[in-house]
């Protein structure tokens, strides 16, 4: 018995087949081999054609069909993970009216800021747990203000994953978790965010019907089955945004569980049962995949834009040709803890939400030409990334989140033993490393939603931490002295910005 998972990102579509009895992965696929283009007709804009996502769904499915034909035709349920916060608008015939406005598009920032000012930040945080910001609701308001001829044709709006589900099943639906990521869910009233819809004068009928995160959401149509090479009637039984799904794929489901990623940007996603928003909205709260009204499970998300991109910059501008990331990690590990006083602030990839949407730029502090060598710079960079993530974690701790376990996929910065050890030692929580990804999470979610797994524990068959990094007391003691100096310097820079 096999499960099929798709992860529809802005850079590629990933897919995998999962054996529900063993947790084995007989085949996985990525399409395209290079990154998908993101169109920017104006500075700060970011758009993609939803038809391109569907094209690469089909191409990824074809790879699976070639690699594991018997497993592919024995699929019993499907799941979807997808890039969050996007906007897809369709007319009454289901035709896409304009390119999707995706997560990294910033055109609606001022629209959201104006809404927060008019509605009152306190009221927004009380009801929505977030400010309207640059999320899906504000993007739709931007279309209403700037593209009225398109707005008049809208019948339904969807998130990227909702659109793929529609292409698979012919059903237009979304989840509570999905509405929350668009700031379209009122947590206090447990209903769509009418206060924000009224402010933007948006018709609530634009919102899709609700479906469960785990559960039958439709069945593969005959036409979609023909395009994918699958039997028709396979149920779609799970969908979730990429960060909630990433946490699910790492079994981060209960209060105190933390899921971390450290690719180009770094994300820490903490699970809580308490709705206590950050007053400055420096982190965001969404409904987690297992959220229920009477048993809340909320995902608190912080993002640091300048994470792996700093390491990449160092590789291309400091290292010699042919020197790779493992060599950089060895040089960094050979330098002393604290890099002999060198501090790095990794904020060189745009405005940072954890810093109140300030664009600080990256900086190096305490550089001594007589002491510091490449190894010092490389270590200080890895430490600075961990410090920046921990600075966001402190915001989350002030919201009542106490890290009990931190889990991460063995990828990107977590390929560095030094980075993982620094993260565990500074936070004081063990770091569990797993071999998994978003497509695997979507497949496991499909098994849970399709009642193929009897319990949530069963859904994680075959998923075991291959390494657990315990805090190092010597490092922890050193960082108890070094990190406060880093934080004080950052806050001084913020005060003078």
Image (tube, rainbow, N blue to C red):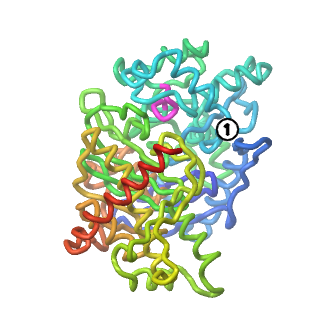
Residue 171 appears left or right of 98:
left
Is any part of residue 73 visible from this angle? no
Residue 228 appears left or right of 16:
right
Q: Position of residue 368 (x, y in %)?
A: 48, 76
The residue under the point 34% across, 60% down is 485
Say above or below: 185 vs 29.
Answer: above
Residue 418 inside the magenta-drawn segment: no
Is any part of residue 215 visible from this angle? yes
Residues packed near mark 1 inside 10 Å, few (<14), some (14 to 19) or many (20 plus):
many
Q: How many marks?
A: 1
In the image, the segment drawn in magenta is 179-184
Which of these two is toward me, 455 or 31?
31
**Label 1 belongs to which residue?**
101
Q: Position of residue 424 (x, y in %)?
A: 29, 66
The residue under the point 25% across, 52% down is 403
Which of these two is toward me, 49 or 477?
477
The residue under the point 68% across, 26% down is 142
The quadrant the N terminus occupies is bottom left
The residue under the point 30% across, 73% down is 467
Residue 49: quarter of image: top right
Residue 194 appears left or right of 294:
right
Q: What element carries label 1?
A: strand
Which of these two is toward me, 332 or 141?
332
Q: Where is residue 376 in the image (x, y as percent from the top left)?
A: 45, 79
Q: Where is residue 227 in the image (x, y as percent from the top left)?
A: 68, 50
């Amino acid at each position: 018995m096999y499960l099929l998972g798709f992860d529809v990102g802005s850079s590629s579509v990933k897919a995998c087949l999962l054996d529900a009895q063993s947790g084995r992965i007989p085949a996985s696929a990525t399409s395209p081999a290079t990154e998908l283009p993101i169109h920017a007709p104006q500075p700060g804009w970011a758009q993609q054609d939803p038809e391109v996502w569907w094209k690469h769904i089909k191409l990824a499915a074809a790879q699976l069909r070639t690699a594991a034909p018997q497993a592919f035709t024995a699929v019993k349920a499907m799941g979807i993970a997808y890039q969050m916060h996007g906007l897809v608008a369709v007319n009454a015939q289901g035709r896409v009216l304009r390119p999707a406005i995706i997560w990294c598009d910033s055109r609606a920032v001022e629209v959201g800021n104006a809404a927060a000012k008019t509605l009152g930040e306190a009221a927004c945080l009380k009801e929505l747990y977030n400010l309207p910001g640059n999320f899906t609701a504000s993007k739709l308001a931007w279309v209403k203000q700037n593209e009225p001829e398109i707005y008049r044709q809208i019948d339904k709006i969807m998130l990227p994953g909702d659109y793929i589900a529609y292409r698979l099943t012919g059903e237009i639906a979304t989840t509570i978790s999905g509405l929350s990521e668009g700031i379209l869910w009122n947590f206090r009233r447990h209903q769509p965010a009418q206060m924000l819809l009224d402010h933007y004068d948006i018709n609530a009928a634009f919102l899709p019907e609700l479906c469960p995160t785990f559960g039958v959401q439709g069945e593969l149509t005959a036409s979609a089955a023909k395009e994918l090479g699958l039997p028709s009637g396979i149920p779609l039984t799970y969908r979730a945004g990429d960060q909630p799904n990433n946490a699910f794929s790492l079994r981060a489901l209960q209060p105190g569980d933390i899921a971390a990623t450290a690719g180009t940007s770094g994300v820490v996603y903490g699970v809580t049962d308490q709705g206590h928003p950050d007053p400055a909205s420096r982190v965001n709260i969404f409904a987690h995949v297992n959220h229920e009204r009477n048993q809340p499970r909320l995902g608190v998300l912080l993002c640091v834009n300048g994470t792996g991109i700093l390491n990449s910059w160092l590789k291309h501008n400091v290292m010699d040709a042919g020197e790779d990331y493992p060599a950089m990690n060895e040089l960094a590990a050979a330098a002393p803890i604290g890099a002999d006083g060198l501090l790095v602030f990794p904020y060189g990839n745009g405005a940072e939400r954890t810093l109140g949407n300030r664009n600080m730029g990256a900086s190096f502090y305490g550089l001594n030409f007589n002491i510091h060598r490449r190894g010092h710079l490389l270590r200080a960079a890895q430490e600075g990334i961990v410090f920046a993530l921990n600075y966001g974690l402190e915001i989350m701790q002030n919201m009542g989140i106490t890290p009990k376990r931190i889990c991460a996929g063995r990828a990107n910065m977590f390929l560095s033993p030094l980075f993982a050890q620094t993260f565990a030692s500074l936070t004081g929580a063990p770091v569990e490393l797993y071999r998994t990804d978003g497509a695997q999470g979507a497949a496991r979610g499909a098994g849970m939603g399709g009642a193929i797994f009897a319990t949530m524990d069963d859904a994680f068959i075959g998923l075991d931490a291959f390494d657990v990094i315990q805090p190092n007391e010597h490092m922890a003691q050193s960082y108890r002295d070094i990190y406060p100096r880093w934080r004080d310097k950052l806050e001084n820079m913020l005060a003078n910005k």
